[in-house]
Structure formats: C-alpha cells, structure tokens
C-alpha cells in the first residue's frame, strides 16, 4: 500500500515494532518513493534498534540498495489490521514481548484496547477503534547527572477551560425537595436529547388515549421486572406520572433491557393495548452520542498525559515507576506533552476500606498530600496540570464532588495545578475532555452482563455511560449521589474524550468517535484488591495527541 502521509509511515513503523523521530518520518515521507525508502531504512537498521533516527534514514538512503527494483517495488510492509474485539491487538508487538523489555525503560504497551462492540440492530454500533501506537520504545530517560535541555514551549498557545464544576456551587441540603429538583433537571436535560426522535406524550396524556393507538413516551426508568412468560415490564416515570411498557422477549431489541439501569432516561415507541393500560414496545431509544458526531481537535501538535489513581501513602505506591514517568516527561521525546490530566485518587486516604491502616506507608492524610505534592514537583515545571478528586481523596464521597478545600490546595501548590470538581468538562485547546473519577463503573459492571461491561474492559462500561449520557445514572446503589438544584452528572455536551480511573484497569476504545480511556493506576496490588480479585494495570501513562486524538500508552514499570 502506498505510503502517502507521515501518519501512514508511523503506522507502518509501529507495525514493524519501531519508534521513529519526527525528522526521520519527514525524511522518509519526502523521498521520491516513500514505501521503497521505508523498506530500505528498516532493512538497514540494527536488529536490536527500537527507535529509528534521522541519521539512520540518511545513512540508509545514501547507500544504494541491491534489493531495490529500479522500476519501483510494491511495499512489503504489512498493513495494520483492525484491532481485535476482545483485546484491541493489532499486528504490532505482543504483550509478552513488551513485558520482556527492561523494566527500567519507558515502553509503549497495548493495555486492554477497545474495538468494535456488538449491539442489536436497533442500537447504533460503536465505531471500529484505530489501535493506539503499541510498540516497545527505546529508553529516553536521562542518565544520572546528564543535564536536560529546557524544552521550547510557548505558554501563550495554550488554553484550558473548565465547565460543569460543582466546586463553590453546591446548594444541596439533603431534604426531599432537593432530590425532586435534581431528578426533574435530569429528566428535562435528557428528554431534550430524545424529543426529536419520538413523538412523545406525557404519562397523564397517554392514560387518556384510546386503546390500539400509537404512543411514545420519554421517562426515567422507575422499575424493570420480568413477567411469568419471560417478557419484560419496564415502568417509566416523567413529571406527570408513571406508565408501564411491555417489551416482548422475541423482539429483536429485547436484549437492550439487559442494559437498563434504574433512573436513566429512555424513550419508547409502540402501541397501546386494547384497554390502553400498557404500551407494547416496538422500539427503544437512548440519549446516546449521535452517529454523525465529529470530534474536535487542536490546531497544533500538542499532547496530554492522562493518568489517575496515584495513591501516594499506600505501601504499594510505585514510586520508582512514577520517577521514570517524571524523568521521561523531561526528555525530547516528550517535548509535546504540555498537559497532565489526573482523574482522581491522588492519595490512598484513610479509612476507605476495611483494615486499610495495615497497608498504609503514611498514616496522616495531610502528610499523604504533602508527599504527593513532592512527587508532583518531579514533572516539568512548565506543564499545565489539572486534577479532580476521587473516592480516596479528602472530599465528600457523594457525587458531584467539589474540588479540594483551601488547606489541601495550599499543600498541593506545585506548578500551580488547576484543581476542579468530579466530574468536570475540561476543554484543552478546543478538545473537550470529560474528566470523571469513575465510581459508577462499579455499578455498571455489577448490573450489566459481562460482555457489555467488565473490569477487564473498563472502556465498554464507559460506552454504556456515553450511551446513557450520564456518568452515574442509578441512584441508591453503590454510587453515592448528592442532591443539587441541577444534575451535574448529565453529559449535556458530547465529549471528544472521556477519561476515567477508579477501577485500576487500563482500557480504551472509541464509541461513535468519542475516545473512552480508563488510565490504570500507580499502585501495585494490595491485599484488599487480592481479596476482591482486582489485578491492577500499574505504571501506564496514556499520551493523547490533541491534534489527531490518536493515543500512545507508555509503560514505566
């Protein structure tokens, strides 16, 4: 296949297990015959090389190739295949090979990448996911006592805006009226996203309609139960009342009932029974991400590192891996990484789970944040840092969570980091990133079938939240929700990137062109995690190209 762009060259090099300097890619792309040039470069580099330099390219192209066909040859470099549905693997380096690399060397690794999900014909199918770069990379960590040249960056080009932050806006008192307000606001926001698709009527109007007529309703899921015959009865509630809807088990979309969570907003269309007491459902709709959605990108080549769950204060915090990550950020290879977005759990906290004190390296919560701040100082001082809290942090557990109080902000003052609430909608140079710690993923994974949501594939659970356009739909379960005057957890806008943590698993994929990333953790397996069968993905740093929304996952352990 002809190599027409530098992007294609990078993909082909990745498929062969190589990284490359930007100048090297440019030199290959500018050759008279780029595919032949790439073949010659790959043939000429040392077998042990992992990174192709501009010098390698110049040397290879300066020597005549005896194997080259003077009339031009078709490239023999294999084209990358689509990622596997289960693992997201492409023809790049295998996980086993990546694990065999020197643990002291930052690597690019595949994690549990997401691919195409299987959905019923009545539901839009998630788009195929181009696999992020996944080859092992050469070490660029500076040797001890080797000075690192300051990186040339122009802060005036940067922009970072936050919306949807509850910090300083919380009005909830816990009274009954607060709960009514937040659910009314949820219904109004999500029903707007559905009204253009169905000719809906409120529940009290449907109750007065004649039997046998067509009917449609938008409502929050109030109850889901099966009948003796194996059909499904879904009760919907709007601001006027409730109405039962029957989904027959033999309908093609019946499996969608397995995806329903209480309190999420859906729309149904169907026909009223003869006595007008029930809707026989013909179709079901979710707020969802429009199939026509086109993500935003930055106007220049700039990158953001997406991490979460650092857990400083735990005996299992991987300080060495963090040090390698921080050192790598100072290198030329990371010169375009100008943003660091942290999705919660900066520290291990105190009293979060049973017998946690036995696994703490630092028992005082303020000392934990002081130590985290010291580790944060290791990253380049000119980076823009934004962080949100998680369930281990010293803020209220109920979501939405406000950002840290002034005492903790003073402690974590390194680099003048931006601190905002959980969740927050962060626009980074035009790219809309929804930052959410991810506690509700436990709920989604517990309630839904394993093929639709699991800890091994956390991005698939994130797909469900995108489909529902709400980061924590179900009230009264595992996720603590705080009543406010408005529902801060609704996805009123479609994000370009959805970034979560919490489950300590690495996974990514695209759902209708929205990149969903769960970024793993920086804490090795604890005794508590062993007891609940959590095998964490440790020491990974997803690196997002904001100009293309392509992603590389770096491994530092």
Image: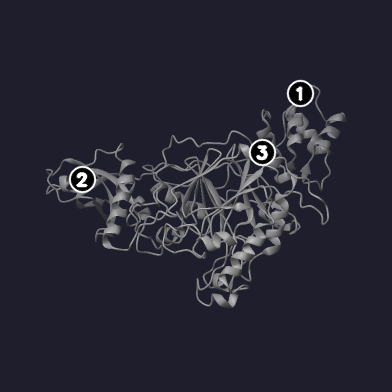
Q: Is residue 170 left or right of residue 271?
A: right
User: Vertical placement of 548 versus 93: above or below?
Assistant: above
Q: Position of residue 397 (x, y in %)?
A: 44, 64
- For the residues labelled 1 and 2, say whether their Cβ atoms are less than 8 Å apart: no
Q: Which mark is residue 154?
A: 3
- Quadrant of the rendered image containing residue 125: top left
Q: Which residue is mark 1?
A: 32
Q: Residue at x 25, y 46 (%)?
A: 281
Question: Based on the displayed image, in which of its 4 quarters is residue 229 positioned?
Answer: bottom left
Q: Is there any visible trace of residue 28 in the rendered image?
A: yes
In this view of the protein, which residue sits in the foreground, 369 or 305? 369
Say which element carries label 3.
loop
Instruction: Report crowding for label 3: few under 14, some 14 to 19, many 20 or more residues within 10 A (C-alpha).
Output: few
Q: CA distance from mark 3 to mark 1?
A: 35 Å
Is 371 located above or below residue 239 in the figure?
A: below
Pick the quarter of the image with the C terminus. Answer: bottom right
Q: CA distance from mark 1 to mark 2?
A: 66 Å
Which callout, 1 or 2, points at the residue further toward the start of the chain? Answer: 1
Q: CA distance from mark 3 to mark 2?
A: 54 Å
- Element type at mark 1: loop
Residue 202 marker: 2
């Amino acid at each position: 296949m002809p190599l027409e762009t530098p992007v294609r060259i990078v993909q082909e090099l990745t498929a062969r297990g190589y990284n490359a300097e930007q100048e090297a890619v440019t030199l290959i792309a500018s050759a008279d015959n780029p595919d032949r040039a790439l073949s010659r470069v790959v043939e000429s580099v040392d077998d042990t090389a992992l990174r192709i330099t501009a010098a390698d390219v110049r040397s290879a192209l300066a020597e005549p190739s005896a194997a080259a066909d003077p009339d031009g040859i078709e490239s023999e470099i294999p084209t990358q295949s689509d990622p596997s549905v289960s693992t997201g693997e492409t023809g790049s380096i295998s996980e086993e090979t990546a694990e065999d690399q020197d643990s002291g060397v930052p690597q690019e690794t595949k994690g549990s990448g997401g691919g195409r999900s299987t959905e019923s014909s009545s539901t839009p199918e998630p788009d195929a996911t181009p696999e992020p770069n996944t080859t092992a990379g050469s070490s660029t960590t500076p040797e001890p006592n080797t000075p690192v040249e300051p990186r040339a960056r122009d802060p005036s080009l940067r922009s970072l805006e936050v919306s949807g932050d509850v910090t300083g806006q919380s009005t909830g008192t816990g009274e009954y009226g607060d709960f009514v307000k937040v659910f009314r606001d949820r219904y109004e926001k999500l029903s707007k996203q559905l009204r253009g698709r169905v000719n809906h009527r409120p529940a009290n109007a449907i109750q007065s309609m004649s039997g046998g007529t067509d009917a449609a309703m938008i409502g929050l899921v109030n109850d889901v139960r099966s009948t003796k015959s194996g059909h499904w009865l879904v009760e919907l509630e709007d601001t006027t009342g409730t109405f039962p809807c029957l989904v027959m088990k033999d309908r093609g979309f019946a499996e969608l009932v397995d995806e329903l969570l209480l309190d999420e907003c859906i729309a149904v269309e169907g026909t009223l029974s003869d006595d007008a007491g029930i809707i026989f459902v013909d179709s079901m709709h979710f707020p969802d991400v429009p199939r026509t959605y086109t993500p935003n990108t930055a106007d220049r080549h700039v990158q953001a590192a997406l991490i979460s769950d650092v857990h400083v204060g735990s005996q299992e915090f991987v300080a060495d891996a963090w040090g390698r990550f921080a050192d790598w950020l100072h290198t030329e290879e990371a010169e375009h990484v100008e943003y660091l977005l942290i999705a919660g759990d900066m520290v291990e906290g105190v009293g979060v789970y049973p017998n946690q004190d036995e696994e703490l390296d630092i028992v005082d919560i303020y000392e934990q944040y002081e130590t985290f701040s010291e580790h944060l100082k290791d990253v380049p001082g000119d980076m823009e840092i934004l962080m949100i809290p998680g369930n281990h942090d010293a803020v209220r557990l109920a979501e939405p969570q406000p950002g840290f109080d002034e005492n903790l902000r003073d402690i974590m003052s390194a680099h003048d980091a931006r601190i905002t609430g959980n969740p927050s909608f962060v626009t980074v140079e035009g790219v809309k990133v929804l930052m959410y710690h991810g506690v509700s993923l436990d709920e989604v994974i517990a309630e839904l079938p394993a093929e639709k949501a699991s800890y091994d594939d956390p991005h698939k659970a994130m797909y469900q939240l995108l489909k529902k356009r709400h980061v924590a739909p179900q009230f009264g379960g595992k996720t603590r929700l705080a009543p406010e005057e408005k529902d801060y957890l609704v996805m009123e806008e479609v994000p370009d990137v959805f970034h979560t943590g919490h489950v300590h698993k690495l996974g990514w994929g695209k759902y209708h062109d929205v990149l969903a990333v769960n970024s793993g953790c920086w804490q090795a397996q604890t005794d508590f995690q062993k007891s609940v069968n959590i095998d964490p993905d440790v020491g990974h740093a997803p690196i997002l190209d904001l100009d293309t929304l392509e992603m590389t996952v770096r491994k530092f352990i």
